[in-house]
């Protein structure tokens, strides 16, 4: 705490992981001897830089850019870039720290990192977004490389931003280095199913948790928060598996759609028009109600998937979900449930899938994109989706099995933290004191 003052979210993420590691440290004294805990909490490198840019009227703005290269024990640093006014060093460090163990769980050769800026892309023109991305990459490029550090998207960074970032990287380095960024367009090195992967993966993970309890998603009533990349494709996969998704949201409020979300309309409003979720309700007519502010978790459902942002599902939200009979909660977003909220859900016997396991499908498919780039190949949607489904099953089974082995059967938080940590710690011990 003294060493990282004010980094509240980072402290929260570290506490959550360390809280699970007692049994593994007792069993593996070599980890304590090599001071793995102290080392894994300290990023290998953290970069903070100035990002100057001019808006369409010529006014100059100065934003702050971040990249935290947290851990490269298993492979090049890998993790998204977030553009949101709330971005600070503490937020980037919490995301980077989570990313280390999430990436390990995928079984792919990728280390952990994260970055972003306090730039707010809302209501900015395409030209402004491009100028910002170019300025951001003009500093960041020197730290990247397919064997060094490979960013992707996150909140506020989607296909459009990755395009501008990649263009500037190529221009500065004079290298068509496809593997330096993931989330690229399908025509220029992107992978089929990457856009869908995080949302799809979260739902596949949920289906696995339910299957272990003798149930499926068919016929279940589902609430989803957010209406961005993760949320939209969680809606899509949940509907494909026969569930009825009755909510989605953004930072202004939430929509309840009793007939089930109209996915085509949602994509039109959010992906094409970049509009607000209230526009969805206006266009959908009598089926849908928009609730300004308030908590989406008040809606009675069987399954809840928080897919917006950190700490959006609190203790009182979890209490409301439990009161309404929720059976499973899986985190599409990173750390959306507060520690108190997790406690309430687990105490009530709800199947709870933590983000580092449940939303790992996105980064896993990014690693598949890197594989395709390295072999100058491009796979079909069906093949990539099958790989994703297999990876999500493996992650589920590894968390489930590890939790049992360490005396906490059914506790996916313990399973995910220990399974991810063991892989990273073993590689760190093997690679010596670096
Ligand atoms: P997007 O920017 O596409 O969408 C974010 C959504 O969350 C929007 O609907 C946004 O609403 C809402 N939101 C963001 N901040 C807040 C806030 N403070 N309060 C309420 N709602 C908010 O981001 P993604 O869908 O890519 O990311 C969502 C989450 O999933 C994040 O936690 C991210 O780290 C995580 N994640 C993403 C992955 C990916 O592949 N994209 C991979 C793994 C995890 P509004 O437009 O009003 O801000």
Image (cartoon, rainbow, N blue to C red):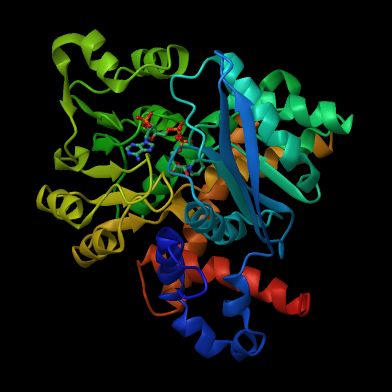
Disc tally is 0
The picture quadrant for ligand 1 comes to: top left
Give the camera-side residue of 227 and 174: 174
Q: Position of residue 361 (x, y in %)?
A: 54, 44
Horizontal side, residue 238 vs residue 134: left or right: left
x, y percentage for residue 311? 32, 51
In depth, the one of 215 and 124 nearer the eye is 124
Q: Residue at x 44, y 38 (%)?
A: 85
Quadrant (top left, top right, bottom left, bottom right) of the C terminus: bottom right
Residue 378 seen in the figure: no
In this picture, is 24 found above or below 414?
Answer: below
User: Looking at the picture, how far across and down is residue 415, in whole percent?
Assistant: 45, 68
Horizontal side, residue 322 vs residue 8: left or right = left
| Left/right of residue 7 with respect to residue 301 in the rendered view | right
Residue drawn at the location 57% of the way across and 59% of the way down = 105
Residue toward you, 84 or 284? 84
């Amino acid at each position: 705490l003294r060493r990282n003052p004010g980094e509240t979210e980072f402290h929260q993420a570290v506490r959550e992981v360390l809280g699970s590691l007692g049994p593994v440290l007792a069993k593996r004294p070599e980890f304590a001897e090599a001071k793995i805990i102290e080392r894994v909490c300290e990023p290998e490198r953290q970069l903070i830089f100035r990002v100057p840019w001019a808006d369409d009227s010529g006014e100059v703005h100065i934003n702050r850019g971040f990249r935290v290269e947290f851990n490269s024990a298993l492979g090049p640093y890998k993790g998204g870039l977030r553009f949101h006014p709330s971005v600070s060093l503490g937020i980037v460090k919490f995301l980077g720290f989570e990313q280390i163990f999430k990436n390990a769980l995928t079984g792919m050769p990728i280390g952990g990192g994260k970055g972003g800026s306090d730039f707010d892309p809302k209501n900015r023109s395409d030209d402004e977004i491009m100028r910002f991305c170019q300025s951001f990459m003009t500093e960041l490029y020197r730290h990247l490389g397919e064997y060094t550090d490979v960013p992707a998207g996150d909140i506020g960074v989607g296909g459009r931003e990755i395009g501008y970032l990649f263009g500037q990287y190529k221009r500065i380095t004079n290298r068509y280095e496809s593997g330096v960024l993931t989330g690229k367009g399908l025509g220029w090195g992107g992978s089929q199913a990457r856009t869908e992967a995080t949302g799809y993966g979260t739902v596949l993970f949920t289906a696995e948790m339910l299957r272990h309890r003798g149930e499926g998603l068919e016929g279940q009533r589902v609430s989803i928060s957010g209406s961005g990349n993760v949320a939209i494709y969680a809606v899509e996969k949940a509907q494909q598996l026969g569930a009825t998704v009755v909510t989605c949201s953004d930072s202004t409020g939430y929509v309840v759609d009793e007939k089930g979300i109209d996915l085509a309309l949602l994509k039109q409003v959010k992906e094409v028009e970049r509009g607000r979720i209230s526009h969805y309700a206006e266009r959908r007519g009598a089926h849908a109600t928009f609730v300004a502010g308030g908590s989406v978790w008040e809606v009675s459902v069987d399954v809840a998937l928080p897919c917006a942002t950190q700490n959006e599902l609190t203790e009182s939200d979890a209490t409301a979900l439990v009161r309404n009979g929720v059976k499973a909660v899986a985190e599409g977003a990173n750390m959306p449930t507060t520690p108190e909220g997790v406690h309430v859900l687990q105490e009530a016997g709800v199947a709870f899938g933590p983000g580092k396991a449940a939303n790992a499908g996105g980064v896993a498919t990014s690693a598949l994109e890197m594989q395709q780039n390295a072999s100058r190949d491009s796979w079909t949607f069906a093949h990539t989706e099958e790989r994703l489904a297999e990876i999500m099953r493996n992650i589920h089974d590894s968390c489930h099995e590890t939790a049992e082995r360490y005396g906490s059967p059914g506790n996916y938080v313990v399973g995910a933290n220990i399974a991810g940590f063991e892989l990273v710690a073993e590689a760190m011990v093997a690679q010596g004191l670096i």
